[in-house]
C-alpha cells in the first residue's frame, strides 16, 4: 500500500473545518434582518422587539416592526375601536374631523390593546372602497396612555 500524500491529508483535515465555518456564516446571514443586524446584535444593543402588547403598556413603548423605515406612511392620533362602513377594525381619530381620520387594520399587532390611547403608527396605505384613508399598521409607538379624543370641528 502507498502512503497517502501530504496534500490529500491536508485537504481531508481542512475541508470539514472550512465547511463548518461556511455553515456558521451562512446561518448568521439567514437569521439577520434586512439591514444586516442579526438577532444577537439586536439583543446585545438592548433593543427589545415585541409584536403584540402585553397587559402593561406605558408611554414610549413600541410594538410591531423594529424598523420604522420599513413603512413609508405614518400618522398620530387617538385610537378608537370600530370601523366606518366596514373597512378596517379601528380608527385613528385626529384633529380636523372625519376627513383626517385614518381607518386601520393590522397584520402585525393587536390594535385592541391601544384603545383610547394616543399613538403614532407606521404602516402602508391602501385605497379604501368607502373611506378616505385605510392603513395596514406595522409599528405602533404609544404617546399617551390616558388620551382624550380630539374635539369635533
Image: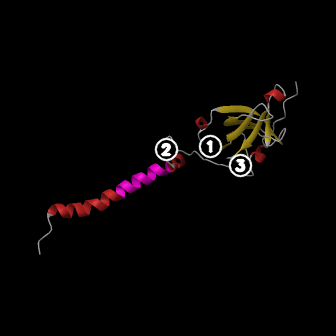
Give the position of the N terminus as an image quadrant: bottom left
User: What stretch of residues is rendered in magenta?
Assistant: 20-33
Where 9 falls versus 143 (above or below)?
below
Q: Which residue lies under the disc numbered 1?
A: 65
Q: For the residue carrying disc 1, how many other residues have a C-alpha within 10 Å: few (<14), some (14-19), or many (20+)?
A: many
Whether residue 80 is in magenta: the answer is no
Residue reaching furthest to the left: 2
The span from disc 1 to disc 2 (Cα, nearest Å) is 14 Å
Q: Position of residue 60 (x, y in %)?
A: 69, 39
For residue 151, the mark is none
For residue 53, the mark is 3
Question: Which type of secondary structure does the marked residue at label 2 adopt?
Answer: loop
- Left or right: 82 in relation to 29: right
Q: Nearer the viewer, residue 52 or 72?
A: 72
Quarter assignment of residue 138: top right
Q: Position of residue 64 (x, y in %)?
A: 65, 45
Q: For the residue carrying disc 3, how many other residues have a C-alpha within 10 Å: few (<14), some (14-19), or many (20+)?
A: some
Residue at x-position 82% and y-position 25%: 96
Q: Earlier in the sequence, mark 1 or mark 2?
A: 2
Q: For the residue carrying disc 2, how many other residues have a C-alpha within 10 Å: few (<14), some (14-19), or many (20+)?
A: few
Q: Position of residue 139 (x, y in %)?
A: 66, 40
> Is any part of residue 63 visible from this angle?
yes
For residue 37, the mark is 2
Where 136 falls versus 5 (above or below)?
above
Amino acid at each position: 500500500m502507498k502512503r497517502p500524500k501530504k496534500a490529500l491529508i491536508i485537504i481531508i483535515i481542512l475541508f470539514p473545518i472550512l465547511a463548518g465555518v461556511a455553515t456558521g456564516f451562512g446561518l448568521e446571514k439567514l437569521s439577520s434582518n434586512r439591514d444586516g443586524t442579526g438577532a444577537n446584535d439586536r439583543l446585545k444593543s438592548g433593543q427589545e422587539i415585541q409584536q403584540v402588547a402585553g397587559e402593561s403598556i406605558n408611554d414610549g413603548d413600541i410594538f410591531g416592526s423594529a424598523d420604522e423605515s420599513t413603512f413609508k406612511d405614518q400618522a398620530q392620533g387617538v385610537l378608537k375601536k370600530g370601523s366606518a362602513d366596514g373597512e378596517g377594525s379601528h380608527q385613528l381619530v385626529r384633529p380636523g374631523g372625519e376627513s383626517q381620520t385614518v381607518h386601520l387594520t393590522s397584520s402585525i399587532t393587536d390594535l385592541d390593546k391601544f384603545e383610547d390611547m394616543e399613538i403614532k403608527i407606521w404602516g402602508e396605505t391602501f385605497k379604501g372602497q368607502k373611506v378616505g384613508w385605510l392603513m395596514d399598521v406595522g409599528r405602533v409607538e404609544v404617546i399617551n396612555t390616558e388620551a382624550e379624543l380630539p374635539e369635533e370641528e
